[in-house]
Image (cartoon, grey):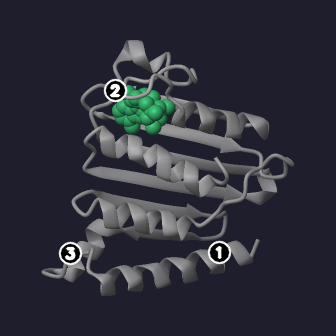
Amino acid sequence: MKDISLHILDIAQNSVAAGATRIAIRISDNASDDSFVLEIEDNGRGIPRDLLEKVLDPFFTSRTTRNVGLGLSLLAQSARDTGGDISVESEEGAGTRVRACFRPSHIDMKPLGDVADTLLVLIAANPVIDFFFSYEKPSERYVLDTREIKAQLEEVPITSPDVLSLLKDELRRSLDAYLDET
Ligand SMILES: Nc1ncnc2c1ncn2[C@@H]1O[C@H](COP(=O)(O)OP(=O)(O)O)[C@@H](O)[C@H]1O
Ligand SMILES: [Mg+2]
């Protein structure tokens, strides 16, 4: 995976496939602690206990179309390459939480990539799913919650081109502002 935003897209797709109606994507970025934490949490069907032990194994998948599961083990590798780690917690019928910790000063740290674009793709492709996104630094926090946006939009669908382009502008501006002042 080329950058963090592609990991986000991939891991969130697992949540979509698991029938989640709400997906939270949280980034907490703390340069002074050399810590970058990515958390993706959903209320999907969860991972059965016996499978949970195997999901970080690159040769495991519950899909039958390809017998190699990659997403979680690739994220684990990206995190571990920097001296970080990953944890996957899941409860059947309740949901799943994936938490990857990175050491951003490490030479193998992947670039963040286009997180605004990734979120837009997820929102546009899954209009009935609510997405919560937060980007947290020690001093401030940016939050986007599509549930609130949908409530404000009333009848207008979140997938309408005008709304998506406004959302994209807002995300770009906010994230750029965040990433600039490190
Ligand atoms: N959020 C999730 N909710 C429920 N099951 C999940 C979730 N994430 C992963 N899984 C299970 O773990 C397996 C491995 O996931 P992953 O490593 O992304 O590989 P793949 O998606 O290619 O199968 C999936 O096939 C699925 O059974
Ligand atoms: Mg996957």
Q: Three-letter amino acid code at disc 3?
A: Ala
Residue 156 is drawn in which quadrant? bottom left
In front here: 73 or 130? 73
Cα gap from disc 1 to disc 2, whole angstroms: 34 Å
**Quadrant of the frame with the C terminus:** bottom right
**Residue placed under numbered mark 3 in the picture:** 151
**Residue placed under numbered mark 1 in the picture:** 178
**Comes first in the chain, label 2 or label 3:** 2
Q: Secondary structure at mark 1?
A: helix
**Residue placed under numbered mark 2 in the picture:** 91
Residue 164 is drawn in which quadrant? bottom left
Q: Three-letter amino acid code at disc 1?
A: Tyr
In percent of the image, x 55 and y 79: which residue is there?
172
Tell me the quadrant of ligand 2.
Answer: top left
Q: Secondary structure at mark 2?
A: strand
Q: Circle 1: is it few (<14), some (14-19), or many (20+) Cα within 10 Å?
A: some
In this view of the protein, can residue 102 be seen by the observer? yes
Asked whether the beta carbons under mark 1 and mark 2 sit within 8 Å of each other, the answer is no
Q: Circle 2: is it few (<14), some (14-19), or many (20+) Cα within 10 Å?
A: some
In percent of the image, x 30 and y 37: which residue is there?
18
Q: Secondary structure at mark 3?
A: helix
Is residue 136 placed above or below 173 in the rendered structure? Answer: above
Which residue lies most toward the right here? 107
Mark 3 close to ligand 1, CB under 8 Å? no
Which residue lies most toward the top here? 50
**Comes first in the chain, label 1 or label 3:** 3
Q: Circle 3: is it few (<14), some (14-19), or many (20+) Cα within 10 Å?
A: few
